[in-house]
Image (tube, rainbow, N blue to C red):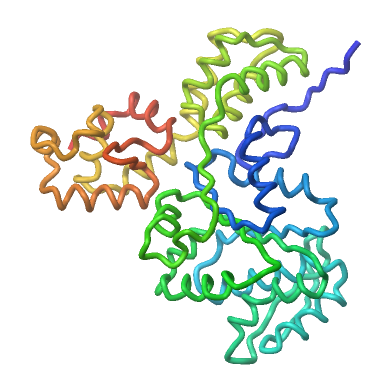
């Protein structure tokens, strides 16, 4: 008799490992090829569609390759150029060196304008931490050239993966900083970059507009929704492994309710799984959906309460199905949206808040659960 696991088979809210990864076969092969052949990659997709999980999967699959080393870092906390240099230098050194002595050696030899400081760390995986203090005026180029110098020293190919790279675009004088990065990185021969993040509209500006320094920096990899067929096998398999049963129609219902959003598929599947003793029922699924809405209620209330009257009416227009008709006079009059210039400003503000996405002329909500929540709270949009 097979052993039945009682541990939750679904993971959400964090990058998934290989056991919880489904599909992305073509994207995985493409990213592996890019890493192996020195092609820079920019990954673009809506939030929570699995960008970080994809990079982690490829990195783990290539972990045993002696000639290639993959360094991963998260720029979410970066607010200034100095923040970025600190993060970049310390992660490059720590992830390419196995001993503290080697950390210090690299910092001293390759970062002459920086002074390395090693201090005890509370992290059991890394008992000491490295920080760098500037003692020179040219530390920026020293830091940006660090991966190339280490790669040449070790005779390896280095792949540098930077998550939440859109934070660079939020800095003051961002274009000047982007030009600095591009001017140094584009000449490196032993280093490849993989850049991605959670704010699609910012990344599209940074990498898709001719006037921006990172235009055509590398291969643009656009993630699409994982097809339902893969989720059918994945979800039903996870239920079966834990001695529970779910039918294909219910899997379709879960997938459809969250519009194929990978993270929400995992989360709603978990909520259904946790309530199921043996076989999933329609009542269990409905209870799980309501729980998902309750879990997001406070966040959505906070987002709604921070909007202006124009922004609320704009949200109301999208909710009413006017995403393709926002510029029509009838829509402007009905929802009191003001001028065309005002609509453009509101649209940009809501994009920045990650409440909406724009594709061509269509405008739609970024979060599929927000749509369901509005059905229960649409009165909040009446101004």
Q: Quadrant of the N terminus?
A: top right
186, above or below 368, in the image: below
Residue 213's x, y, as percent? 44, 67
Front residue (pair 31, 54)? 31
Q: Quadrant of the C terminus?
A: top left
Left or right of residue 66, residue 362 in this image? left
Left or right of residue 205, residue 51 in this image? right
Left or right of residue 121, residue 138 in this image? left
Residue placed furthest toward the right: 1
Residue 142's x, y, as percent? 64, 82
Q: Residue at x 68, y 53 (%)?
A: 35
Q: Residue at x 74, y 37 (%)?
A: 18
Front residue (pair 254, 21)? 21
Q: Residue at x 77, y 68 (%)?
A: 94
Q: Residue at x 30, y 52 (%)?
A: 349
Front residue (pair 160, 243)? 160
282, above or below 104, in the image: above
272, above or below 66, in the image: above
């Amino acid at each position: 008799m097979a052993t039945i696991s009682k541990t939750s088979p679904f993971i959400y809210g964090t990058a998934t490992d290989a056991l919880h990864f489904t599909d992305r076969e073509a994207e995985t092969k493409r990213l592996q090829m890019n890493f192996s052949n020195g092609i820079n990659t920019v990954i673009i997709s809506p939030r929570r569609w699995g960008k970080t999980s994809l990079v982690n999967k490829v990195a783990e699959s290539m972990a045993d390759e002696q000639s290639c080393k993959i360094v991963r870092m998260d720029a979410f906390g970066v607010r200034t150029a100095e923040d970025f240099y600190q993060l970049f230098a310390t992660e490059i050194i720590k992830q390419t060196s196995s001993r503290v002595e080697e950390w210090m050696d690299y910092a001293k030899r390759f970062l002459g304008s920086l002074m390395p400081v090693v201090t005890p760390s509370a992290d059991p995986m890394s008992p000491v931490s490295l920080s760098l203090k500037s003692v020179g005026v040219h530390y920026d180029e020293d830091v940006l050239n660090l991966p190339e110098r280490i790669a040449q020293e070790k005779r390896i190919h280095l792949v540098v993966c930077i998550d939440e790279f859109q934070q660079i675009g939020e800095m003051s004088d961002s274009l000047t900083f982007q030009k600095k990065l591009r001017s140094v990185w584009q000449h490196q021969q032993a280093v490849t970059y993989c850049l991605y993040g959670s704010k699609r509209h910012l990344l599209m500006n940074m990498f898709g507009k001719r006037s921006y320094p990172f235009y055509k920096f590398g291969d643009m990899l656009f993630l699409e929704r994982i097809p339902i067929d893969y989720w059918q096998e994945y979800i039903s398999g996870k239920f079966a492994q834990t001695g529970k049963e779910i039918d294909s129609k219910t899997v379709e219902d879960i997938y459809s309710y969250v519009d194929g959003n990978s993270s929400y598929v995992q989360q709603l599947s978990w909520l259904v799984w946790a309530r199921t003793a043996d076989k999933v029922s329609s009542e269990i699924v409905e209870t799980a959906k309501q729980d998902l809405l309750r879990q997001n209620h406070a966040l959505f209330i906070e987002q709604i309460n921070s909007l202006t009257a124009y922004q609320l009416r704009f949200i109301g227009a999208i909710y009413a199905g006017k995403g393709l008709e926002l510029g029509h006079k009838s829509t402007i009059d009905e929802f009191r949206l003001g001028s065309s210039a005002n609509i453009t400003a509101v649209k940009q503000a809501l994009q920045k808040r990650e409440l909406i996405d724009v594709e061509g002329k269509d405008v739609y909500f970024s979060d599929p659960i927000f749509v369901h929540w509005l059905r229960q709270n649409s009165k909040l949009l009446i101004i």
